[in-house]
Image: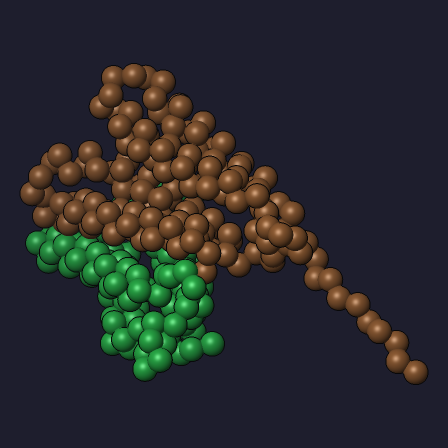
Amino acid sequence: MPRLSSIFIRASLMYLVLGFTFGSLILANKGVPFAPFIWALLPIHIEFLILGWLTQLALGVAFWILPRLTSNTPRGDERWSWAAFALVNLGIALNIAAPYAGFIWLGLLARILQAIGVAAFAIGNWQRIYPLKFSFSARQ
Amino acid sequence: MPTITRWFIKAALVSLVLGLAAGIWQQVASTAGMFPVYLHLLTFGWLTQLIFGVAIWMFPMYSKEHPRGPEWLVWSVFGTLNLGLLLRVVFEPLQSLSPTIFGAWALVAAAILQWYSGMAFAAAVWKRIRTK
């Protein structure tokens, strides 16, 4: 698989590990309360699993699997997709930090960066979504 | 399609139906504790389980002897994921309505099983994510 896909998917697995860990702590605490502060992990659990795990796995596999272009750059201008990786992950980091950083606009900035990142991925890979092309040759 | 993948995808579809049914139940009966059940049946039982099944099938080979990774490991992902989910589906609403010690520890067990399923999946596929 291409290097960017490998990076996207490995990152998504790290988010899976962390997100599942936080979620399990929250559920266990729900059953047998041992640390009330655990509930503070809930937004991080959600962010890590929705944006970190699900979204990045989808982007990574899509970058790998989508039909290739018949050009020197079979996966299009890869800079769009690399930008997507950077922006989505920066957005996750900023969104986690937002409640603690004291800047009320940090969460909004995080979401804007993530939206731009996903839009960049769409722009960079849009042309790879094309119908099957084949030709018949008549033989006599 | 390998057997393990068929089990994952069929279980994912069952979770999808149950999750949507839980969504309907919430509109009709509004039982305490149902919202996390609804959410996790859809995100964990349907989405994540479907991804697990297809990834185990489609990712590059683990090794020639075990192309999809150690069999016991991937089956343990399936077993713990679904057992943990089942415990959660049963006991999360029950604990909200009528908490018991048994129910409390059942939720702890659900948490551990679900946690294990994620760790085991990551361990099973990590080596399969590689550039040529």
Residue B76 pos. (x, y %): 25, 71
Report the front residue among B44 and A110: A110
* Residue at (53% x, 36% y) in the render: A119
Report the front residue among B45 and B66: B66
Residue A83 pos. (x, y %): 46, 37
When asked about the image quadrant of residue B70, the answer is bottom left
Apparent side of residue A61 relative to residue A66 in the rendered image (left or right): left
Chain A, hue in figure = brown
* Residue at (32% x, 82% y) in the render: B65
When asked about the image quadrant of residue A52, the answer is top left
Residue A122 pos. (x, y %): 56, 41
Tell me if residue B7 comes above or below residue A130 in the rendering: below
Report the front residue among A119 and B88: A119
* Residue at (50% x, 56% y) in the render: A64
Apparent side of residue B90 relative to residue A4 in the rendered image (left or right): left
Apparent side of residue A52 relative to residue B92 in the rendered image (left or right): right
* Residue A75 visible to the viewer: yes
Tell me if residue B60 comes above or below residue B85 in the rendering: below
Numbered circles on residues, count: 0
Chain in green? B
